Image (cartoon, rainbow, N blue to C red):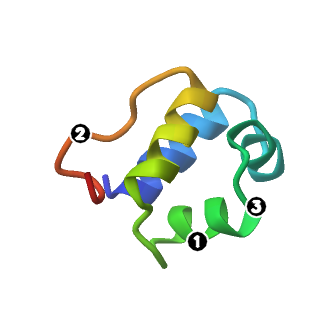
Amino acid sequence: MNPGEILKSTRTAAKLTQFQLAARAHVDTGTISRIERGATRPRAEVVAKIEEALETRIWTKEEPDR
């Protein structure tokens, strides 16, 4: 699985919409969408916010840009 697929799978398992996750992570909804589509690789700061919002670690140190 690529980072976007991992994010989408984790988000949907948590029963969250992109909007809900973005609000919890304090990032733009478009950011979540672009990551899930593979259109962008999130910065470490964004990864940390998303992981905190999901209360789980979803990327390894090698993914995406850590």
Q: CA–CA distance between discs 3 and 2?
A: 23 Å
> Residue 65 falls in which quadrant of the image?
bottom left
Sequence-first disc among 1 and 2: 1
Q: Is residue 21 left or right of residue 19?
A: left
Which residue shows up at 48% across the image and 79% down it?
39
Which residue shows up at 74% across the image and 49% down it?
22
Looking at this view, name the residue that lies furthest to the front.
45
Amino acid bearing label 3: Thr
Crowdedness near tag 2: few (<14), some (14–19) or many (≥20) residues, C-alpha within 10 Å: few
Q: CA–CA distance between discs 3 and 1?
A: 9 Å
Q: Which mark is residue 60?
A: 2
Q: Is residue 42 left or right of residue 17?
A: left
Amino acid bearing label 1: Arg
Sequence-first disc among 3 and 1: 3
Sequence-first disc among 3 and 2: 3
Crowdedness near tag 3: few (<14), some (14–19) or many (≥20) residues, C-alpha within 10 Å: some
Image coords of residue 59 (percent x, y): 32, 41
Q: Secondary structure at mark 2?
A: loop
Of residues 65 and 14, the one drawn nearer to the viewer in this rendering: 65
Q: Which residue is mark 1?
A: 34
Of residues 64 and 26, the one drawn nearer to the viewer in this rendering: 26
Number of marks in the rendered image: 3
> Residue 20 falls in which quadrant of the image?
top right
Which residue shows up at 56% across the image and 41% down it?
50
Q: Is residue 21 left or right of residue 65?
A: right
Image coords of residue 15 (percent x, y): 74, 30
Q: Which residue is mark 3?
A: 29
Q: Secondary structure at mark 1?
A: helix
Q: CA–CA distance between discs 1 and 2?
A: 19 Å
Amino acid bearing label 2: Thr
